[in-house]
Image (tube, helix red, strand yellow):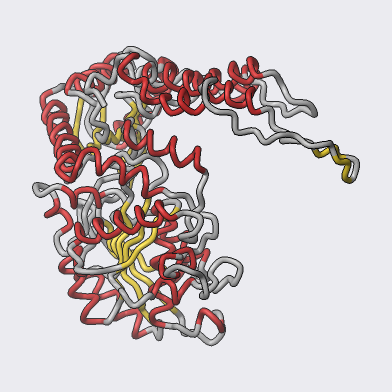
């Protein structure tokens, strides 16, 4: 793909496949029609679908995506969003489903409106979440998998995609530092954490799969105060109970304190509870903190506990020789959650659970041995029917888009992507320090830059209760202005006693130094009169 991806003619590959597929010159594959048959009042004669009309619609939609998303939505001169309040947007869009189908020109217009009023997450000035930007190879991969519409539970229906997933998991396992392991892609880091929690419980209480929760001791797990909220959700969903999630104290940078972990484990045992899992976090959601994995692993080894590392956000630093030290000790974990759809831009959703165990623990824990899918007398090696180690039946080939990006860029290209994002983060931090009215919460460890904007009216005020109360109103008000203007999107939140502050996250390689400057200029422009 040409580096000059902004030009129309150089991105024709995006719908090239549609042009080939839909060419009027291709050989007709329609079978010859026989006499119609009437069954239950339905005339059966040839396909119901209007193939020609469908092909034309796909072709026009591909062209629309090319023009309005790939080209226009990545243009820094365009808006990040065309903001409308819910009631007004409901009026602007024709959302009603009717008894009869609607003409394709109207459907195309609806598609155009959907694109127009959606947030352009691939815009260089979208900084709102822990994902952003457009990877062209991943997008092409998604087009292929969407068109093929596979489900990867057995080799017979998804031969290529199962082998691709195997190859990607093997490479990710190498990045962690394990000699061998297992894994599976699933719909999100939250699900990966749930997988790990259930897997650890099964490891310690294997009878639970058949006998359920009856007779089990009180199980308790440990994670940091800064952990992802999915830990509480998983405990609730699995019947462990949110009261049995012990939140370990963190230091001023948001890292779990190993000494506090040891203390809480001992207290739980004295109370008659059964500790079974510790979840460390590599890249917390707000502050981007990395727990000290080596020290936490020492504690887990002393107490015989499963160590899971939620590296959904920070795991991508593993591909960088410069920054992988942030996850020092991760090779000692029993399981790891890692989301390539974040820093590596594989496209939502692309999330892996990786497990050090190679004794088929995943399959033992989750297998239901469905005889209509996982027959053992097939004509090929049934070890490739990996669907029986998943909690899902139908499962998307999410590894493929990441594989295509990895093939295109190589590990060195992925490393450059991470290094550049963190270099831009450092540039922004230094600019914040130079500018009047901007104040860092702390020096960032990763790509999360947390800061306040203090408007001129508050700069001479003493930092007492009234100051903080007024400052808490600033970020939400500026966020409203930037959303309605469509100039950029940036997250904000209060956090552990600190009033609302901006959280800027750098991910996309489309982001430039000029975008960092614009971010600060725009915040100052929108907030200086407050």
Indicate whether 494 appears above or below 255.
above
Residue drawn at the location 21% of the way across and 64% of the way down: 257
Asked whether 144 or 215 is in front, the reply is 144
**Res. 441 in view:** no
Q: Position of residue 244 (x, y in %)?
A: 44, 71
Q: Position of residue 468 (x, y in %)?
A: 31, 34
In-image side of 136 versus 112 (left or right): left
Asked whether 268 or 73 is in front, the reply is 73
Where residue 128 sits, quadrant-wise, is top left
Indicate whether 361 appears above or below 26.
below
Residue drawn at the location 41% of the way across and 65% of the way down: 384
Q: Look at the image and tell me in which quarter the C terminus lies.
A: top left
Q: Look at the image and tell me in which quarter the N terminus lies.
A: top left
Residue drawn at the location 90% of the way across and 41% of the way down: 41
Q: Position of residue 287 (x, y in %)?
A: 26, 45
Indicate whether 186 appears above or below 333.
above
**Res. 183 in view:** yes
Q: How many marks?
A: 0
Where residue 510 sits, quadrant-wise, is top left
Q: Position of residue 192 (x, y in %)?
A: 40, 59
């Amino acid at each position: 793909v040409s580096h000059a991806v902004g030009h129309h003619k150089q991105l024709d590959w995006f719908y090239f496949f549609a042009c080939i597929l839909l060419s009027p010159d291709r050989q007709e594959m329609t079978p010859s029609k026989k006499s119609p048959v009437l069954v239950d009042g339905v005339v059966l004669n040839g396909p119901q679908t209007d193939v020609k009309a469908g092909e034309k619609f796909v072709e026009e939609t591909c062209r629309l995506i090319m023009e309005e998303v790939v080209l226009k939505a990545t243009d820094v001169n365009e808006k990040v969003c065309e903001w409308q309040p819910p009631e007004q947007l409901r009026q602007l869009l024709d959302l009603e489903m009717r008894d009869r189908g609607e003409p394709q020109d109207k459907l195309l217009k609806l598609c155009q409106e959907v694109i127009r009023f959606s947030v352009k997450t691939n815009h260089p000035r979208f900084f709102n979440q822990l994902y952003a930007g457009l990877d062209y190879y991943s997008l092409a991969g998604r087009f292929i998998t969407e068109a093929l519409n596979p489900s990867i539970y057995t080799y017979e229906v998804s031969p290529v995609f199962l082998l691709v997933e195997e190859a990607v998991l093997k490479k990710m396992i190498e990045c962690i530092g394990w000699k061998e392991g297992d894994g599976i892609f699933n719909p999100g880091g939250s699900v990966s954490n749930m997988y790990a929690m259930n897997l650890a419980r099964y490891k310690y209480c294997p009878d639970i799969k058949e006998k359920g929760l009856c007779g089990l001791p009180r199980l308790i797990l440990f994670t940091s105060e800064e952990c992802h909220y999915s830990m509480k959700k998983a405990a609730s969903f699995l019947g462990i109970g949110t009261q049995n999630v012990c939140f370990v104290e963190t230091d001023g940078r948001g890292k779990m304190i190993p000494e506090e972990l040891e203390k809480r484990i001992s207290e739980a045992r004295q109370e008659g509870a059964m500790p079974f899992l510790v979840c460390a976090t590599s890249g917390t959601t707000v502050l981007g903190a990395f727990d000290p994995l080596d020290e936490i692993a020492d504690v887990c080894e002393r107490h015989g506990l499963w160590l899971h590392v939620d590296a959904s956000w920070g795991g991508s630093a593993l591909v960088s020789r410069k920054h992988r030290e942030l996850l020092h000790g991760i090779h000692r974990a029993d399981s790891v959650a890692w989301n390539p759809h974040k820093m590596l831009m594989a496209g939502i959703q692309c999330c892996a659970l990786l497990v050090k165990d190679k004794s088929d623990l995943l399959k033992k824990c989750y297998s239901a041995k469905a005889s209509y899918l996982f027959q053992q007398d097939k004509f090929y090696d049934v070890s490739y029917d990996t669907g029986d180690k998943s909690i899902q039946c139908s499962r998307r080939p999410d590894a493929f888009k990441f594989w295509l990006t990895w093939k295109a860029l190589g590990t060195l290209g992925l490393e450059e992507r991470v290094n550049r994002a963190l270099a831009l983060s450092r540039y922004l931090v230094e600019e914040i320090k130079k500018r009047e009215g901007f104040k860092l919460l702390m020096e960032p460890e990763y790509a999360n830059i947390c800061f306040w904007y203090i408007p001129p009216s508050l700069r001479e005020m003493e930092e007492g209760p009234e100051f903080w109360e007024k400052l808490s109103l600033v970020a939400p008000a500026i966020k409203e202005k930037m959303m309605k203007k469509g100039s950029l999107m940036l997250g904000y939140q209060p956090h552990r006693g600190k009033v609302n502050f901006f959280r800027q996250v750098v991910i996309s390689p489309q982001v430039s130094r000029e975008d960092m400057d614009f971010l600060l200029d725009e915040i100052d422009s929108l907030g200086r009169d407050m």
